[in-house]
Amino acid sequence: MDLYSWLLALHLLAAFAIAAALVLYSALVYTGRRMRTLEDTRYVFRLAPIGAPLIGAGSVLALLLGIWLAIKSPDYHVWDGWVIAALVLWLVFGAIGGRTGAYYTGVQKIADANEPGAEAEVISRLQAPTGLLLHLGNIAIFVLLLLDMLFKPGA
């Protein structure tokens, strides 16, 4: 295998790491919306840190390897429209992901504080549409990124 093949394989593995984290977070968002006690929500929040390194490392590696692939390829260039679209989508993905993470981190802090009324606040925030819509937005952007990578519009 040549260097380009290795870069492509690692780029794909990075994308799979992001997808795995999104699947985990989808399960946690779904489960969290059905929680009824503060103790149950703590179990959900214990699993969430598994996805952080997957999505963080996967995002950075996918970006860096993708740029490297565009530079190494004789057929594609960093200034191609589909590559620029991927970079913009990557930025949007990161921005929405940051907001989603901040939302759920805030809910977790309330759960961990264990103050009076925390249970009702945590349950209502987990059931509110805000976190779900942010997460669905992230999934939609990721799917657009995948479609951009697969079909390379304009290439």
Image: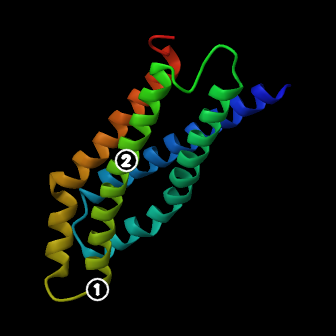
Above or below, comparing residue 106 to residue 6 in the picture:
below
What amino acid is at disc 1?
Ala
Give the residue at x 60% y 34%.
67
Badge 2: how crowded within 10 Å, few (<14), some, or many (20+)? Answer: some
Q: Nearer the viewer, residue 79 or 33?
A: 79
Give the residue at x 45% y 20%.
81
Tell me which corner region of the image, top left, top right, bottom left or bottom right, holds residue 76.
top right
Tell me which corner region of the image, top left, top right, bottom left or bottom right, holds residue 75.
top right
**Residue 22 seen by the camera:** yes
Q: Quadrant of the N terminus?
A: top right
Provide the residue designation for mark 1.
113
Q: Secondary structure at mark 1?
A: helix
Provide the residue designation for mark 2.
26
In the rendering, at what x and y percent does residue 89 appear?
39, 35
In the rendering, at what x and y percent does residue 141 appear?
36, 35
Q: How many marks?
A: 2
